[in-house]
């Protein structure tokens, strides 16, 4: 009985992951994979925080119909709630090991994905991951630009404050 529940849970996790990469950007999944690999984080709450720091909230809360989605549709992934996905990533990594993303997507493409993915599941999985890596790269650059912009605003504000102090001191 527990084995059946485990198999059903893994299947649900595969479908969740696969749909993210097939119908959305896959940024959240790739960010989580990077974090779990580099930092060893496997707690969904800690993974959530690390993903937000890495790619920002919009990418973490992405759903299928999110503006970042390259293939908009009517599907909504937990109404943008990232926790089922984060829990799925952790469970899939525990099930498949360090190469969880490729193995899980290959299984998804071979049995649960759209018909187009089933022709060559391994190649289709690699293609989905490649596309998601490009999206992650773009998201990282966007986040870097936002962080840089905030830093410039902060520096400008401090400069303006220092300048007004200097003007007051000169006037006195």
Image (cartoon, grey):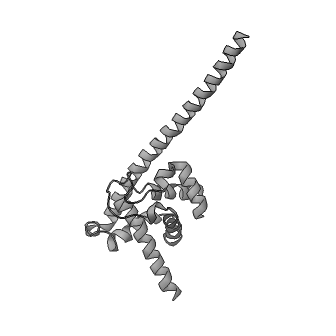
Q: Tell me where residue 99 appears, x and y as whole percent.
A: 47, 64
Q: Tell me where residue 79 appears, x and y as whole percent.
A: 44, 63
At x 45% / y 71%, what residue is drawn? 13
Where's the C terminus, which quadrant? top right
Q: How many marks?
A: 0
At x 45% / y 80%, what residue is drawn? 8
- Tell which of 52 and 109 is nearer to you: 52
Residue at the top extreme of this rendering: 171
Left or right of 122? Residue 152 is: right
At x 49% / y 62%, what residue is drawn? 81
Q: Tell me where residue 169 appears, x and y as whole percent.
A: 72, 14
Occupied quadrant, residue 167: top right
Occupied quadrant, residue 123: bottom left
Residue 40 seen: no
Left or right of 157? Residue 113 is: left
Residue at the bottom extreme of this rendering: 1
User: Up-down: is 27 above or below 118?
Assistant: above
Occupied quadrant, residue 168: top right
Q: Tell me where residue 147 appears, x and y as whole percent.
A: 53, 39
Residue 166 seen: yes
User: Up-down: is 136 above or below 141?
Assistant: below
Residue at the right extreme of this rendering: 172
User: Up-down: is 113 above or below 145?
Assistant: below
At x 56% / y 49%, what residue is drawn? 53
- Tell which of 69 and 4 is nearer to you: 69
């Amino acid at each position: 009985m527990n084995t059946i529940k485990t198999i059903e849970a893994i299947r649900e996790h595969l479908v969740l992951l696969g749909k993210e990469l097939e119908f959305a950007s896959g940024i959240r999944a790739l960010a989580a994979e990077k974090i779990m690999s580099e930092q060893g984080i496997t707690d969904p709450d800690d993974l959530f925080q690390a993903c937000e720091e890495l790619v920002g909230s919009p990418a973490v809360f992405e759903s299928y119909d999110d503006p970042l989605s390259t293939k908009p549709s009517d599907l909504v992934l937990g109404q943008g709630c990232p926790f089922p996905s984060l829990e799925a990533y952790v469970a899939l990594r525990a099930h498949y090991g360090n190469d969880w993303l490729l193995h899980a997507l290959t299984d998804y493409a071979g049995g649960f994905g759209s018909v187009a993915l089933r022709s060559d599941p391994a190649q289709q999985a690699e293609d989905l991951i490649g596309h998601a890596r490009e999206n992650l790269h773009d998201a990282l650059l966007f986040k870097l630009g936002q962080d840089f912009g905030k830093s410039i605003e902060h520096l400008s504000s401090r400069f303006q404050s220092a300048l007004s102090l200097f003007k007051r001191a000169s006037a006195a």
